[in-house]
Image: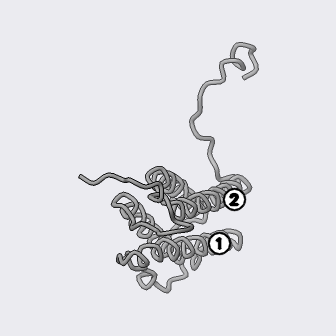
């Protein structure tokens, strides 16, 4: 068994950059694959959305997914690894919406909430500073995008109140 014997193990910005470790590769691969799928879905959704606000939201998501796909696949390629391919070519040319804007927005909001969890998990297992910095920046970007999506749902009256804890203080004071 080999042991790490230098603090340079965490390098990534300066000095010798060590090869990616297995868990870093696993998370990068997963996030590249998720962004490839998200890109294709966003292309389709932006083609068929009825409202200009929804179309703009999906186009912005496409830009984010493309940027993250390129960054993560670039890290893998620099390490001599193959990244999953994009699947944009599988999207049809249809402009007829199979779903409502409400459902498509909710779907993307849910997918980006899952992306926040995936990036957080990847960050927790990442020891290279350069890769960790990407996850931190991308977490903030995805968080802002998800918040904007929920605000769009609220604006349109489409966001249902999720289950929540009981407000015992309000119940005790009869203000419910």
10 Å neighbourhood of mark 2: few (<14), some, or many (≥20)? some
Q: In the rendered structure, are the residues bearing label 1 and label 2 in contact, judged by CB atoms less than 8 Å apart?
A: yes
Q: How is the image coloured?
A: one colour
Quadrant into which the C terminus falls: top right
Res 87 quadrant in image: bottom left
Residue lying at 57% horizontally and 79% vertically, measured from the top left:
47
- Horizontal side, residue 126 vs residue 84: left or right: right
Q: Nearer the viewer, residue 141 or 78?
A: 78
Indicate whether 95 appears above or below 132: below
Q: Position of residue 125 (x, y in %)?
A: 43, 52
- Horizontal side, residue 68 vs residue 87: left or right: right
The residue wearing badge 1 is 60
The residue wearing badge 2 is 148
Residue lying at 54% horizontally and 78% vertically, measured from the top left:
43
Q: Position of residue 57 (x, y in %)?
A: 66, 69
Q: Secondary structure at mark 1?
A: helix
Q: Secondary structure at mark 2?
A: helix
């Amino acid at each position: 068994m080999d042991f790490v014997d230098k603090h340079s193990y965490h390098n990534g910005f300066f000095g010798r950059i060590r090869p990616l470790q297995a868990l870093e590769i696993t998370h990068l691969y997963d996030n590249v694959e998720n962004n490839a799928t998200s890109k294709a879905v966003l292309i389709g959704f932006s083609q068929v959305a009825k409202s200009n606000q929804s179309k703009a939201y999906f186009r912005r998501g496409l830009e984010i997914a493309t940027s993250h796909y390129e960054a993560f696949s670039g890290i893998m390629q620099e390490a001599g690894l193959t990244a999953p391919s994009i699947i944009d070519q599988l999207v049809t040319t249809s402009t007829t919406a199979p779903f409502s804007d409400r459902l498509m927005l909710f779907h993307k909001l849910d997918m980006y909430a899952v992306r926040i969890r995936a990036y957080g998990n990847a960050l927790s297992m990442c020891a290279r500073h350069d890769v960790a910095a990407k996850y931190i920046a991308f977490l903030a970007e995805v968080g802002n995008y998800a918040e904007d999506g929920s605000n769009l749902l609220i604006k349109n009256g489409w966001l249902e109140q999720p289950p929540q804890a009981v407000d015992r203080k309000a119940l005790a004071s009869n203000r419910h």
